[in-house]
Image (cartoon, rainbow, N blue to C red):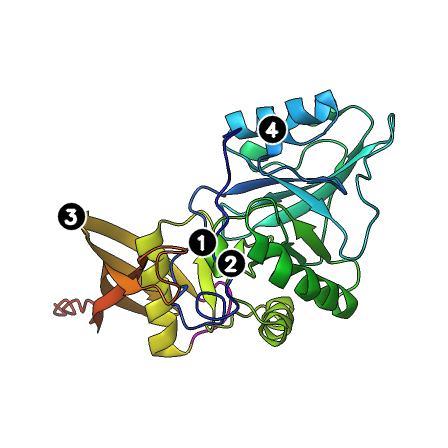
Amino acid sequence: MSGGKPPKGCTHPAGCHTGEVPVLASATVGARTWLLVEHEGPWAAYLPDCDLPGKTLSLIERATALGIRPQLIRRPGDRPRNRTRPAGQDLRVLLAYTATETPWLAEGVFADPDDLDLEALVDGVVPRSCILVSEAVFLVCTHARRNVCCARIGLPLARLLGENHPGRVWETSHVGGDRYAANLVCLPHGLYYGSMSQAAALVAANAYRHGEIVLDRFRGRAGIPEPLQAAEHFVRQHTDELSVGGVAVESSRSDGDVTEAVMRCGDVRFRVVVEPMAFPSPCGTACAESIATYRLVSLDRLTPVRYATPALT
C-alpha cells in the first residue's frame, strides 16, 4: 500500500499501551517469511515511499510479491536527520523463515540486491551468500510516521533493550498492531509481544533467549491464524507450559465464528473451542470503539484412545 494519510493512532499515555487491553491472538497472520533491510532513515509512512535506492525498492517489491514480509531496520540510538546510505555501499539484510517447527535466521551483505535469491527463502532454504545466525534477534517498532506512539514508547525501549542485548536489537518499521505499541518481535520464531513496558520487554527477551514464552502481553506467533493463536494461549494458560515449542496445533475446524482446535501439549491433547469477542477500548474512538479479541468457550483434555488387547489363543 502506498500513499494516503496514515492513521495517527492513540497518543494518550494511558489505556491501550499499558497492558489493560488484551493483546492475545493479534500477531500478524501473513508473516511467515521475513526480509529485514538495514536503512537508517528517514522512513516514510509506507515502505514504497521511502527514499531508497532503486534496486532496494525493487528488492522490497519482489519480496512483497512473493509473500515475504519486508521490514526496514536500524540500530537503536540517536542518529543525524536525513541520513541515507551512501551510493555504492553494500546492502545488509537479515532473513527469517518462521513457517516451521525449526525456524531459522540468516544474514547477508550484497553489493547488488538483485543477487539475493528470495525464491530460496520462500522454499525454506538459506539463500546463497547468506549465513545462518545462531542468536535471537529482537525487533522493536519505532515507526513514527505510521503511529507516533510507536516512536514515543518504542524508542526508549529499543535503546534499553539494545544496552542489555548488544548487537541483537533493531528498531524496525511497522510490524502491525499500532494500538499495541510498544511492539516487540522475537526472531526467528516470530513471537509478538504488545503494550510492552521496558521491564516487560527485558523479561520477554531474556525468556526467549532461554527458549521460553512469557504469557503476559504475548500477542502470539506470526503466521498462525488468530483463532489458533488464541487456542495456544489458553492451553498455555491452563497448563503453565511456557517452552517455545511446547504447544502445537494438530487439527482445527471452524463453524462460523467458532473455531475448534485439537492442541498437543507434550503427551497430552486438548480440544479447545474459541470465539471472537469485542473488548471496549479505554481510548474511546481514538483507536476504535472496541478491540477484537477472543474468549475461551471450552477446553477439555482428550481421553487417550484405548484399544482392547487381543485374546491369546
Reading the image, the residue beneath label 4 is 48
Of the residues shown, which amino acid type is indicated by label 3?
Gly
The image quarter in which residue 262 lies: bottom left
Q: Earlier in the sequence, mark 2 or mark 4?
A: 4
Task: Indicate left or right for 9 with 159 as reference.
Answer: left
Res 212 visible: yes
Q: CA distance from mark 1 to mark 4?
A: 23 Å
- Prevailing SS of the magenta stretch: loop
Q: CA distance from mark 2 to mark 3?
A: 26 Å
Reading the image, the residue beneath label 3 is 256
Q: Position of residue 60 (x, y in %)?
A: 62, 29
- Label pair 1/4, CB-CB below 8 angstroms: no
Q: What secondary structure is found at the residue carrying circle 2?
A: strand
- Nearer the camera: disc 2 or disc 4: 4
**Disc on res. 215:** none
Reading the image, the residue beneath label 1 is 27
Of the residues shown, which amino acid type is indicated by label 4?
Pro
Reading the image, the residue beneath label 2 is 192
Vertical comparison of 311 with 120: above or below: below
- The range drawn in magenta is 241-246
Q: CA distance from mark 4 to mark 3?
A: 36 Å
Q: Earlier in the sequence, mark 2 or mark 3?
A: 2
- Label pair 4/3, CB-CB below 8 angstroms: no
Q: Earlier in the sequence, mark 1 or mark 2?
A: 1
- Label pair 2/3, CB-CB below 8 angstroms: no
